[in-house]
Image (cartoon, rainbow, N blue to C red):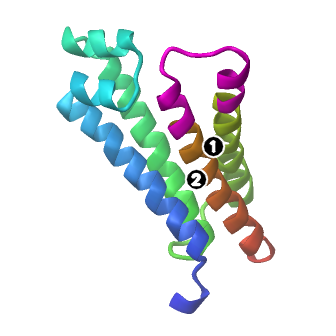
Amino acid sequence: MIASLNILLLLAAATDTLAALLHVGCIVFGAPWYRFFGAGERMVQLALEGNPYPGRVSAAVVVVLLIWAAYALSGAGAIPHLPLLKLGLCTISAVFLLRGVFGVVLLLIKGVRNPRFWWWSSAVCLGIGALHLIGAIQVWPRL
């Protein structure tokens, strides 16, 4: 069984989970984490004021990322087949890849306040999207 697991989708699930945990860190540790990870100054300010909005947004992102990790694990063959698995893997890949491309395009044509954040976050999203996409292509016939 272990030999038939797809390594790229396992890595995708791990990166999704890591991203979810970093968002949990933002909820727990507040404004310094939001600032470090490149959240806009408005989100940082709201967190400093104790406003629940940043935590709610981060919690929603955590839930989505953990669902995406489950879909990657399902595609990898590590957990049972989830509903709409092909559509889910395609959608997850597209969201990550589009976010990565959008960030690069935004940097090139518009300029942004925090270019370092946009470069590294776009690279991370492109990498995670590639893991999902290539892994999904590899397992497509058995999904």
Residue 104 picture quarter: top right
Residue at 50% from the left image edge and 50% from the top image edge: 67
The residue at which mark 2 appears reads as 128
Nearest to N terminus: mark 1 or mark 2: 1
Residue at 25% from the left image edge and 16% from the top image edge: 47
Question: Residue 34: image x %, image y %?
Answer: 31, 26
Q: Is residue 143 visible?
A: no
Residue at 28% from the left image edge and 33% from the top image edge: 26
Which kind of residue does numbered mark 1 sit on?
Phe
Question: Residue 56: image x %, image y %?
Answer: 35, 24
Residue at 71% from the left image edge and 24% from the top image edge: 108
Question: In the image, which disc is placed on residue 96?
Answer: 1
Circle 1: is it few (<14), some (14-19), or many (20+) Cα within 10 Å?
A: many
Quarter of the picture holding the C terminus: bottom right
Indicate whether residue 110 is drawn in magenta.
yes
Q: Are marks 1 and 2 in contact (CB under 8 Å)?
A: yes
| Segment tinted magenta in the rendering | 104-120
User: On screen, 128 above or below 116?
Assistant: below
Question: In the image, which disc is placed on residue 4?
Answer: none
Circle 2: is it few (<14), some (14-19), or many (20+) Cα within 10 Å?
A: many
What is the CA distance from the residue labelled 1 to the residue labelled 2?
7 Å
User: On screen, 16 above or below 12?
Assistant: above
Residue 32 picture quarter: top left
Say which of 69 and 108 sits in front: 108
User: On screen, 65 above or below 30?
Assistant: below
Residue 84 picture quarter: bottom right
Is residue 109 left or right of 112 when viewed as pictured?
right
Q: Furthest residue to the right?
A: 141
Question: Residue 3: image x %, image y %?
Answer: 56, 91
